[in-house]
Image: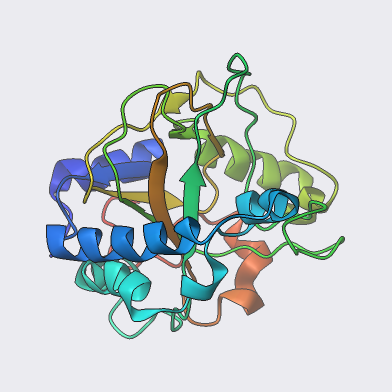
Amino acid sequence: MTLAETEQESLVREGYVRVAAAVPPPRIAAALRAINHSIGQGLCPADLPTFRARSFCPELQRAPVILELLGAVWPLVESLLGEGRVEPVRSGQIALAFPQLEPAAPPYPHLDGLHTPTNGVPSGEVRSFTLLVGVMLSDVVPGAGNLTVWPGSHRLYEAYFREHGPRSLLKDMPPVALPEPVEVTGRAGDLVLCHYQLAHAVGANTSSHVRYAAYFRLKSLGHDDRRWECLTDLWGEWPGVRGR
């Protein structure tokens, strides 16, 4: 399993790509069954801010039914990051977006791994990674709590970090003008691959349905020792990406 040439070109240019029907329906169904059983036991309102920032159904994050979603596309991952060159993945994020009653607010762009009061990242640290892998567990139409991205922002941030130094990320998000955001839509079983450095957000869910997704944050072997230089070298950890 590899990306088509046009898909890889999109990944390089835009910072993300959607791959249709990448995960088999039985694995999607099994994950949904486990998630729905879990939330059917009840959600404590006090836990919701942490669940939104980290993961719903934390008892399932390391379960085979979740990790097998990533296993279905592992050959594709290694075609990009190199065979045997990805750190073991031991957990996934179960990301649910429930319908909201208030009007939609504009999405706010961010990079993962920066401190917030609820995400568990200590202040003064940047917990970066190489590749974000998202699996759509439900059909996602516009306005359904979509993953929202700013195409090409990874290249804008690379230029900023080259000029101002990568550790400037410890202060705040780079103050650069971004393009218009795009809501990523698709069907259950579709895959979304995003470069770590792509600005993204969770869009508002003004639909009638819960949006289900699972995310995995992958590191190239030894990434933690290179985390700062990676901010100024977008594709240094991606040996399978052509025309970088």
Q: Nearer the viewer, residue 72 or 98?
A: 98
Q: Position of residue 101 (x, y in %)?
A: 58, 20
* The residue positioned farthest toward the top in the image shown: 103
**Residue 31 seen in this snapshot:** yes
Q: Where is residue 235 in the image (x, y as percent from the top left)?
A: 44, 58
Colour setup of the view: rainbow
Image: 121 above or below 232: below
Q: Position of residue 130 (x, y in %)?
A: 49, 63
**Residue 24 seen in this snapshot:** no
Left or right of 225 on screen, residue 93? left
Q: How many numbered callouts?
A: 0
Tell me which residue sits at (34%, 80%) in the image: 64
Q: In which quarter of the image is residue 42?
A: bottom right
Tell me which residue sits at (39%, 62%) in the image: 37
Q: Nearer the viewer, residue 107 or 30?
A: 30
Q: Quadrant of residue 56?
A: bottom right
Tell me which residue sits at (57%, 35%) in the image: 156
Q: Which of 104 and 172 is in front in this view?
A: 104
Q: Quadrant of residue 82?
A: bottom left
Q: Where is residue 39 in the image (x, y as percent from the top left)?
A: 48, 57
Image quadrant containing the N terminus = bottom left
Image: 22 above or below 16: below
